[in-house]
Amino acid sequence: MHTHKIVFPNPAGFSLRDTFTCGQCFRWTERESRWHGVVGEQAVSVWVEQDSLFVEGITPPDRKFFRTYFDLDGDYERYKTRISAAHPFLHMACAHAPGIRILQQDGWEALASFILSQNNNIPRITGIIDRLCTYFGKPLGNSYAFPTAERLSGLTIDELSPIRAGFRAKYLLDAARQTVEGRINFDRCCQGSIKEAREELTRIYGVGIKVAECALLYGFNRLEAFPIDVWMARAMSAHLPEGLPKEIADIAGVAQQYVFHYVRLNGSK
DNA sequence: GGCCAGGCTTTTC
DNA sequence: GAAAAGCATGGC
């Protein structure tokens, strides 16, 4: 089958595995040393060879889109330097930080995904989202797009039951309906103050601070968002009881990702 | 079988 | 207001 391929210089230390499995996204799987996923309506495979990052699809992958998606213009060396300097514990977390980059995912997809993440574990979240896409997403060859808010907004709880989301189904439907009705201002999530952005999202039934912060960090390019889940809460009380140093408030989300990864691997001690 | 998982809403004190 | 219960599901 004929395919199209684009190539980027691979950023130093960038790890697809760490980036895709660190809990920020749920739709990438590894097969035969390549990562397969759907972004928007593009089903692609991605891999690293020597110093190059390849993105391949049936249709030509949009170069600018993927440059943004992988945050290839983000200076992660600079982020690590600043975060390391802010606190000894952060210095250690950075020293163990693998090549994670914060993906710039679609806002609606990130919002919906993290609504489904609450009081749940990553393997099961992945399963629910996989079923959600298979049942309700637009078919794309062998895979499916993430379903639109429009599609989901017309469903009932019963119709959503095959995805086995449990009590989260009603939250997802409220998010879809409010989005379609124009009650959630996505521009404000991207460009308003972080407080305004939070208010915009927590208007949704079932969206609290944690889910809002995740959606903002992963889906709305807000690096200052700082999600605190049970893992982060343990790490913060053990190592940063005074809170995150304010001089890195603008990149708190990046620090969060390194700490989250560190404590999941090593425990909070 | 109890506990936990990238929590939030509702109820109760 | 703070604390606890209830919520669906599945892996361990």
Image: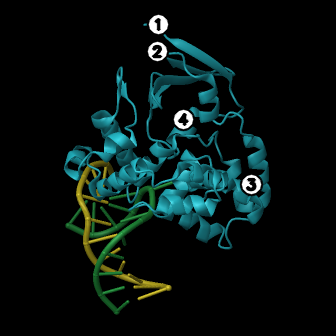
Chain colours: A cyan, B green, C yellow
Q: Residue furthest top?
A: A2
Query: What residue is at 45 percent from the left and 28 percent from the top?
Result: A41
Name which residue type carries label 3: Ile
- Chain letter of the residue beneath label 4 in the structure image: A
Who is closer to the viewer here, A114 or A76? Answer: A114
Residue A14: image x %, image y %? 65, 34
Q: Of tags 2 and 3, which is closer to the observer?
A: 2
Q: Position of residue A178 (x, y in %)?
A: 40, 54
Cα separation between marks 4 and 3: 22 Å
State which chain disc 3 sits on: A
Identify the residue position indicated by label 3 in the image. Answer: A83
Please tell me which residue lies in front, A37 or A240: A37
Q: Which kind of residue does numbered mark 1 sit on?
A: His
Question: Going from the N terminus, do you reach mark 2 or mark 3 first?
Answer: 2
Numbered circle sitting on residue A17: 4
Q: Are marks 2 and 3 in contact (CB under 8 Å)?
A: no
Residue annotated with mark 1: A2
Check residue A58 in the rendering and tell me which mark sits there, or answer none. Answer: 2
Disc nearer the start of the sequence (4/3): 4
Vertical comparison of A169 with A27: above or below: below
Quick one: SS at disc 2?
Answer: loop
